[in-house]
Image (tube, rainbow, N blue to C red):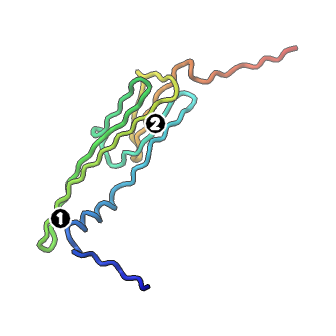
Amino acid sequence: MALVKWEPLFPDTAFDEMLKSFSNFPKVGGVDVYETDDSYVVEAPVAGLDPKDIEVTAENGVITIKGESKSTSEKNKKKKYFKQEVSRSFFYQTNIPGRGVWDNVEAEIENGMIKVTIPKAEDEKPKKIEIKKKG
């Protein structure tokens, strides 16, 4: 049996252009949740989004990160007209494993990642115990 190269039925159509454009989307990963001695941290990818397009909420031990962006591009080639509207939205939600100080939650974006920091309640922080020498 010989292998035959696939040829599309209608090559170079607007549909083909649309399919090619999907390969340019950033790959979206999941949420990382970890803790340090002083806080709980939630990190999630938000590459290419402006902070005004992202909403972070903290309620009852749950952090929610959601956002949406829209863009439009137009191409005019060889008597063909192509207009593409792209809408990207995401929704991350995760529980925090301990008790945090919810009035002091901070969020910042750096290198396409949002980092939400929840300070730990004082009784959740590790305590250093002094060891006494007896005798």
Q: Most extreme residue toward the right, as rendered?
A: 135
Q: Residue at x 82, y 17 (%)?
A: 133
Q: Earlier in the sequence, mark 2 or mark 1?
A: 2
Seen from the viewer's position, the closer of residues 114 and 60 is: 60
Disc 2 element: strand
Looking at the image, do the residues carrying marks 2 and 1 touch, with CB atoms under 8 Å apart? no
Disc 1 element: strand
**Image quadrant in which the N terminus is located:** bottom left
Seen from the viewer's position, the closer of residues 131 and 44 is: 44
| Image height of 5 relative to 100, above or below | below
Residue 110, image x, y percentages: 41, 43
Residue 128, image x, y percentages: 67, 22
Residue 92, image x, y percentages: 39, 39
Tell me the number on the disc at residue 75.
1
Q: Is residue 64 left or right of residue 86?
A: right
Q: Residues within 10 Å of mark 2 (few under 14, many from 20)?
A: many
Q: Residue at x 45, y 40 (%)?
A: 43
Q: Residue at x 50, y 31 (%)?
A: 40
Q: Quadrant of residue 122?
A: top right
Seen from the viewer's position, the closer of residues 91 and 72 is: 91
| Image height of 53 relative to 38, above or below | below
Tell me the number on the disc at residue 42.
2
